[in-house]
Image (spheres, rainbow, N blue to C red):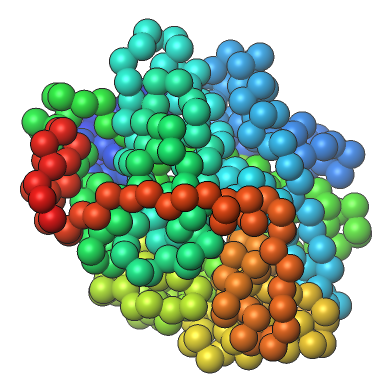
């Protein structure tokens, strides 16, 4: 399968090239040239298949031409060493819990898949070290760092905005050591993302080092996220609730929801999607007006969605050929203030005895307000609530238990490299001659 750039000005790339490069030469995002339909028979029997079996069928449609079946199966099965259960929250609203992986957030799925696929490619071609650059507003960094930890031939640089990720998130990528370097940038998430993008465009750097991205723009992280949408459907079908399914995705960079929309275009019977935003409502505004107007991100309590210029908008736009009517026919939006998010966490906890994290709370609320008669909603619970401990505890006025996996990270020693938001400083550091900051 070949991959084209959303900017249409770069040559087609193989899967290998798209994974190693991350971003196309023209700064566009790679898209698979075909989205294969899955056979009806697959959907007829999906309720009888395991998560791994379902995921392998989906993976085969994307990657089967480029990765031998045995290797692909091993990569998929290793990646999904944990469950993504659907849990009932209220009458017609269900939570797809994506926080049962090692860093307790959905990004574990994409990050673990990408680490294994990249490692497969590195083994294929000999031993040049690959450097993974990843900008994070919180959860990407931990998922990528843990997904790649100890993987031979790969070094990971995690860039995060100083003082803007929660202490629990921070310790998940600053305490690992080995092949993981954490870089604390004096700026906001968009500055981190800009540094990473500039690094990929810098000729000198790319001559001297093999750089790749592990942000949600990378097809190896992005496409595997579609796996759990199919699995959610299978679980809803088992419950007899799969008709008129509406899936709501708390969205920041829009990688997660875009992979779900890919699933729908492969034949997954979803009626429509809702993108739930926090106060960073750029996509919501686009749906209302047809004008995409990026602006600087603002900090909220759902900080993994604090994105002012969502990268994957380019993929949605490309997928629908820029047709605003087609986009709004399949995707609607919602936007919530911190106050509304707090109120939702509190209400759902009291009424339904279900504890949402701030991102999932946006998802729940958008369904509670937006479901029409006869529809059933599934929202993606994108992280474990204990990852946002202070916020959640202060809202419900009660202590929240910290899962053992999280507590283990918090015992480690934090180590990170301070960095300005100037690209020249970051480049000097990567080239091994850092300036004093
Ligand atoms: C990354 C993240 C999101 C946003 O996902 P996108 O794919 O960037 O839209 C939502 N919730 C949590 C907890 C996240 O970590």
Q: Is residue 262 visible?
A: no
Work out which quarter of the rendered image holds the N terminus and state it: top left
Is 326 or 200 nearer to us in this picture?
200
Picture coordinates of residue 315 (x, y %)?
39, 51
Residue 62, by quadrant, is top right
Q: Is residue 261 above or below residue 180?
A: below
Work out which quarter of the rendered image holds the C terminus and state it: bottom left
Is 333 or 88 nearer to us in this picture?
88
Is 423 or 286 nearer to us in this picture?
423
Q: How many marks?
A: 0
Residue ID at (72%, 36%) = 81
Residue ID at (69%, 88%) = 397
Residue ID at (73%, 68%) = 401
Residue 190, by quadrant, is bottom left
Picture coordinates of residue 419 (x, y %)?
21, 54
Picture coordinates of residue 415 (x, y %)?
38, 49
Q: Is residue 63 above or below residue 350?
A: above
Residue ID at (71%, 54%) = 404
Residue 75 shown left or right of residue 91 in the figure: left
Residue 120 shown left or right of residue 42 in the figure: left
Q: Is residue 224 visible?
A: yes
Residue 2, by quadrant, is top left
Residue 410 shown left or right of residue 236 in the figure: left
Is 319 or 409 nearer to us in this picture?
409
Picture coordinates of residue 375 (x, y %)?
76, 73
């Amino acid at each position: 399968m070949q991959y084209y750039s959303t900017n249409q000005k770069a040559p087609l790339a193989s899967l290998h090239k798209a994974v190693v490069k991350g971003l196309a030469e023209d700064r566009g995002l790679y898209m698979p040239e075909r989205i294969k339909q899955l056979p009806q028979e697959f959907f007829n029997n999906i309720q009888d298949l395991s998560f791994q079996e379902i995921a392998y069928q989906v993976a085969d449609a994307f990657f089967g031409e480029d990765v031998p079946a045995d290797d692909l199966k091993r990569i998929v099965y290793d990646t999904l060493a944990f469950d993504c259960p659907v849990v009932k929250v209220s009458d017609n609203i269900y939570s797809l819990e994506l926080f049962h992986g090692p860093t307790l957030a959905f990004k574990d799925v994409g990050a673990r898949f990408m680490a294994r696929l990249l490692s497969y490619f590195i083994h294929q071609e000999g031993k040049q070290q690959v450097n993974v650059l990843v900008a994070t507003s919180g959860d990407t960094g931990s998922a990528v760092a843990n997904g790649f930890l100890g993987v031979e031939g790969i070094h990971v640089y995690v860039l995060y905005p100083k003082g803007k990720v929660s202490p629990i998130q921070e310790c998940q990528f600053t305490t690992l050591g080995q092949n993981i370097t954490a870089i604390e940038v004096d700026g906001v998430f968009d500055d981190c993302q800009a540094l990473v993008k500039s690094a990929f465009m810098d000729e000198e750097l790319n001559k001297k080092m093999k750089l790749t991205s592990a942000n949600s723009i990378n097809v190896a992280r992005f496409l595997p996220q579609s796996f759990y949408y199919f699995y959610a459907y299978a679980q809803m079908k088992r419950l007899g609730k799969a008709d008129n399914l509406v899936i709501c995705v708390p969205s920041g960079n829009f990688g997660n929801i875009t992979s779900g929309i890919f699933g729908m275009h492969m034949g997954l019977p979803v009626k429509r999607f809702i993108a739930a935003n926090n106060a960073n409502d750029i996509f919501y505004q686009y749906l209302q007006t047809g004008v995409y107007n990026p602006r600087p991100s603002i900090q909220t309590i759902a900080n993994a969605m604090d994105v002012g210029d969502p990268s994957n908008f380019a993929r949605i736009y490309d997928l629908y050929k820029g047709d605003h009517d087609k986009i709004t026919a399949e995707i609607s939006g919602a936007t919530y203030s911190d106050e509304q998010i707090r109120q939702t966490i509190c209400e759902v906890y009291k009424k339904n005895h279900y504890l949402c994290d701030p991102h999932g709370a946006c998802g729940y609320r958008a369904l509670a307000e937006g479901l029409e008669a006869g529809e059933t909603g599934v929202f993606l619970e994108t992280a474990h609530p204990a990852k946002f401990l202070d916020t959640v505890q202060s809202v419900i006025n009660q202590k929240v238990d910290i899962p053992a996996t999280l507590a283990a990270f918090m015992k480690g020693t934090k180590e990170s490299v301070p960095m300005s938001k100037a690209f020249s400083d970051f480049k000097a550091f990567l080239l091994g001659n850092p300036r004093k900051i």
